[in-house]
Image (cartoon, rainbow, N blue to C red):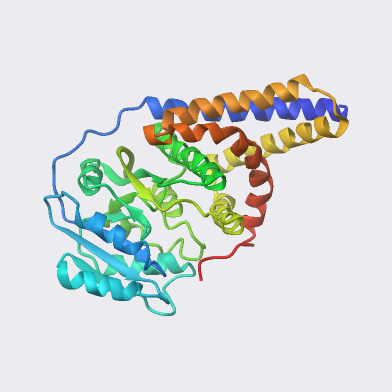
Amino acid sequence: MELMDLQKSGLLLSGAIYVGSVLWLWRGLSGRPSPALVSDQPSVSAIVAARDEEETLPHCLDALARQDYQGAFEVIVVDDRSRDRTWDIIAAKAETWPALKGVQATPDGWFKCPKKSALAEGIAASTGEILLFTDADCRPPADWVRSMVAHFAPEVGLVAGYARPDPVSGVLAKVLAVDNIGVGALGAGSFGMGHPLSCTGRNLGYRRQVYDELDGFAQIGHLIGGDDVYFMRLLGAQSKWAMAFNRQTVVLSQQPPAKFADAIQQKLRHASKGGHYKGQAFYLAVGVYLFHGFLAWGLVQMLWTQSWNSWVAGVWFMRWAVDLLLLKRMATPEEGALLRYLPLAEVLYIPYVLIFTVVGRWGWFRWKT
């Protein structure tokens, strides 16, 4: 087979896999009904790990204090070795808010990943039947706890949700916000199809019973990051508990990094999780990687030779079309205007997939120290 034939065959085959995967997610966003909502009001603990968050933590605490949940509710904030006034803010708020408990993380930590260690210490200090998680730079809406708990039908062990940056200003931040919509669609769509692939610790919850049954983070403690995705996949692999996605409430988070260097480090951390995929998720990731490789090959060849290739261009625009279809279904009304940055995001996504997933897999990124 000639090189050009191999390129064309590879692009068309991997392109078909990519399009099929996107349409699968699109169906998941629109199809399968969620488990029936419940009216029980079990005790809830919201766990927040905070490291050097003196600027954002007060807004997070104010949002958690406004929760309208009628059941027993407590907030555990773990100061993860902060070097600023984070602990002072926690201590001051706890004096006027009895539901808040501050914990100072041990210096050495329990696991290789500092955040997992902080969260584990927070869970150990908590009492709730349902454990909810968000980040210190997030602002959950007032109905967050109530809405998340309502999705814990008797068979459901984990509930995931969507989080979006707000406000978003600057071209780089808007491109990253478009990527965030795509990551949200990967999570919500795969949950909807009954095969969860992604979730975020900015909006997540699971039963304490589930945490105890899986021995907490012990099996994933050696992995950097992934206190959300790795735990979700561990549950799927070793438990019969069902999982649900809550699209009724959206957590607001700090806007993406404004500096290019910080954005690169963030995306490297995110990409590093892909190297630990297993089973169907691994084969899907390989298919997506090959698709972008063949697509990059064709696009570079077109630019190098300055000649139009109709089938490369056709696949390129087909990718835009299906991605737009998916993101329009996932985006909240406030995010609709961001989709005008999709073409730029599509261009940048090619080197992200081809380079960042490899670099991130080998741990060549800077964690928050």
* Residue 66 picture location, percent across and down: 19, 53
The one of 133 and 64 positioned closer to us in this rendering: 64
**Hey, which residue is sitting farthest bottom in the picture?**
107
Quadrant occupied by the N terminus = top right
Query: Which residue occupies the foreground of this view, 354 or 361?
Result: 354
Q: Name the residue rendered at 49%, 36% in the picture.
A: 338
Quick check: can you spot residue 85?
yes
- Residue furthest out toward the front: 170
* Whether residue 23 can be seen here: no
**In this rendering, position of residue 50 left or right of residue 261:** left
Q: In this view, does 317 lie to the left or right of 229?
A: right
Figure check: 326 above or below 113: above
Quadrant in the rendering for residue 163: top left
| Residue 12, placed above or below residue 233 | above
- Residue lying at 55% horizontally and 25% vertically, measured from the top left: 322
Residue 19: image location, x then y, percent: 58, 26
Residue at point 22%, 47% (across, down): 142
- Up-down relation of residue 360 to residue 142 (above or below): below
Give the percent coordinates (x, y) of residue 123: 29, 65
Q: Which of 87 and 298 is in front in this view?
A: 87
Q: In this view, does 280 lie to the left or right of 8?
A: left
Comparing 15 with 59, the one in front is 59
Residue occupying image coordinates x 20% and y 64%:
127
For the image shown, how many numbered marks are present on the structure? 0
Q: Where does the image place residue 61, in percent across and percent down from the top left?
A: 26, 61
Whether residue 105 is situated above or below residue 220 in the rendered picture? below
Furthest toward the left, the residue is 70
